[in-house]
Image (tube, helix red, strand yellow):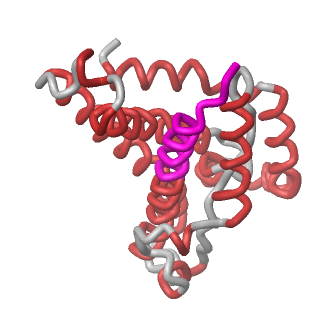
């Protein structure tokens, strides 16, 4: 199988731009909502911004996604890999209405990712309905590139939202779950927080996480695209 350098380069650029854009908005959501609840920790560190630079982790945001894309592009199927933005620092002691703040701050990134996916899907549907995207102009050119950008935006942001919704440390959903758990569960939860990333990594590599999130992922994509 011949290697198409131009195709690889264009898809890599779209993938990395969308990924950096999406994860930056996700982390911005955490920082902004935490600031609104009275915690200025992230604000003082320059994290309440849509500028992607403060949200980039060299390994989790750049290196690992690049490696994952290259492996997936040059082999059959997707390479299971965890990637992340620079974690947003928060100080719960500064929050007003701590339980409400914990839920809202934890869900903020997820909500923003879903909103991005909805907006991108709506633009795609408008472009199709207005025949801006047709079979004739879809192959190659700026229309094709823009469509691929929007479609990747939908797929990645839906995937990010669902993945982070899982109630498993260190994902955002675990923070929401922690708010409603009885105090008797805290020792167990603390253990999970200590080893959660390693356990999550194993579950990703075994394909367990994909099995869990795929049905909901397909459902949301079906709703967005009306199929």
Residue 76 place in picture, x, y as percent: 72, 21
Quadrant location, the C terminus: top left
Residue 206 place in picture, x, y as percent: 84, 27
Q: Nearer the viewer, residue 181 or 74?
A: 74
Residue 182 place in picture, x, y as percent: 70, 50
For the record, the magenta segment spans 1-19
Q: Nearer the viewer, residue 21 or 69?
A: 69
Quadrant location, the N terminus: top right
Q: Residue furthest top?
A: 227
Instruction: Specify whether residue 203 is painted magenta.
Output: no
Residue shown at 59% from the left, 38% from the top? 5
Lateral position of residue 14 relative to residue 1, left or right: left
Task: Please tell me whether the stretch drawn in magenta is mainly helix, strand or loop.
Answer: helix
In the depicted structure, whether residue 7 falls above or below residue 138: below
Residue 204: quarter of image: top right
- Residue 111 visible in the current orientation: yes
Q: Residue furthest bottom?
A: 44
Image mark count: 0
- Residue 178 visible in the current orientation: no
Q: Nearer the viewer, residue 187 or 117?
A: 117
In the depicted structure, whether residue 210 falls above or below residue 174: above
Residue 115: quarter of image: top left
Lateral position of residue 14 relative to residue 196, left or right: left
Instruction: Specify whether residue 11 is painted magenta.
Output: yes
Residue shown at 86% from the left, 57% from the top? 194
Q: Residue furthest front?
A: 2
């Amino acid at each position: 199988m011949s290697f198409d350098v131009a195709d690889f380069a264009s898809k890599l650029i779209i993938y990395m731009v969308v990924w950096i854009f999406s994860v930056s908005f996700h982390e911005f959501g955490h920082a902004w909502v935490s600031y609104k609840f009275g915690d200025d920790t992230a604000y003082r560190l320059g994290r309440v911004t849509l500028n992607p630079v403060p949200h980039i982790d060299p390994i989790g945001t750049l290196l690992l996604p690049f490696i994952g894309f290259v492996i997936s592009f040059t082999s059959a199927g997707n390479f299971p890999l965890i990637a992340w933005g620079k974690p947003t620092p928060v100080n719960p002691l500064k929050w007003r209405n701590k339980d409400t703040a914990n839920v809202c701050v934890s869900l903020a990134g997820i909500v923003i990712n879903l909103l991005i996916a909805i907006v991108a899907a709506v633009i795609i549907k408008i472009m199709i309905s207005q025949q801006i995207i047709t079979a004739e102009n879809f192959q190659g050119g700026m229309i094709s590139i823009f469509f691929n950008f929007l479609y990747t935006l939908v797929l990645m942001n839906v995937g990010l939202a669902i993945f982070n919704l899982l109630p498993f440390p260190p994902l955002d959903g675990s923070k929401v779950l922690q708010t409603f758990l009885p105090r008797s569960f805290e020792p167990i939860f603390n253990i999970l927080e200590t080893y959660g990333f390693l356990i999550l990594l194993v579950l990703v590599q075994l394909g367990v996480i994909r099995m869990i999130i795929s049905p909901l992922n397909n459902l949301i994509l079906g709703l967005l695209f009306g199929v």
